[in-house]
Image (cartoon, rainbow, N blue to C red):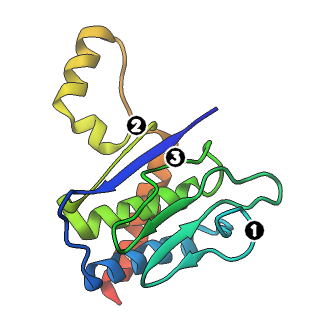
Amino acid sequence: MGYTHHFHFRKGAEIDERRWKDAVSLGKACAEASGVTIKGADGTGEPIINDELVCFNGDKNGDHHCETFYIKRNGELKSFCKTRREAYDIVVCCFLLAFKYIFKKDFEYTSDGTTRGDLRCKENKEYWAKYCPNYVPKVEEEWSAAYKLFNKVRKAWLAA
């Protein structure tokens, strides 16, 4: 079963060194605070999180991995990451939030999970009202946990 996040830099976006380092630093702080084990691309070894590349997966031990989260400073990225809601999903979400927070409109993401942005989207509200009048949309628990962790870490990160 899939559960996928899609992401990209806006065409022509400047991925400057300062913003890259800030996004990576904030994402890495979230990963460390999460308590979740992340591994290298194949679910073994060490993740790569540095000034040029963010590349990690869940832990293959115990089958808690799926697809690699991969994004390079030169703008090269794997434009999606299927996590199957494995434990490392919160780390993927936090990195997406960190890149969005730092790069603003230059970075976009969507998710199979309902995010805060989905709840604010006019088209979604109109669709739910027309086709699902009894549906009460809410942020999915995976994203709720990621927002909570991200906001906590971001406050400490900004204060440092």
Three-letter code for the amino acid on which mark 3 is drawn: Glu
Q: Which of marks 3 and 2 precedes in the sequence?
A: 2
Distance of label 2 from label 3 (alpha carbons): 9 Å
SS of the residue under disc 1:
loop
In this view, the residue in front, 38 or 75, is 75
- The image's mark for residue 114 is 2
Residue position marked by numbered label 3 in the rendering: 142
Q: Residues within 10 Å of mark 2 (few under 14, many from 20)?
A: some
- The image's mark for residue 44 is 1
Distance of label 1 from label 3 (alpha carbons): 24 Å
Quarter placement of the N terminus? top right
Measuring from the top left, give residue 25's x and y in whole percent: 42, 81
Residue at 20% from the left image edge and 72% from the top image edge: 14
Three-letter code for the amino acid on which mark 1 is drawn: Thr
Q: Which of marks 3 and 1 precedes in the sequence?
A: 1
Q: Is residue 142 left or right of residue 103?
A: right
Residue at 24% from the left image edge and 15% from the top image edge: 129
Three-letter code for the amino acid on which mark 2 is drawn: Thr
Residue at 39% from the left image edge and 65% from the top image edge: 76
Quarter placement of the C terminus? bottom left
Question: Does the residue at mark 2 contact the one at mark 3 (Cβ under 8 Å)?
Answer: no
Residue 146 sits above or below residue 142 on the image:
below
* Res. 137 image quadrant: top left
Measuring from the top left, give residue 122's x and y in whole percent: 16, 30
Question: Does the residue at mark 2 contact the one at mark 1 (Cβ under 8 Å)?
Answer: no
Residue 52 sits above or below residue 71 on the image:
below
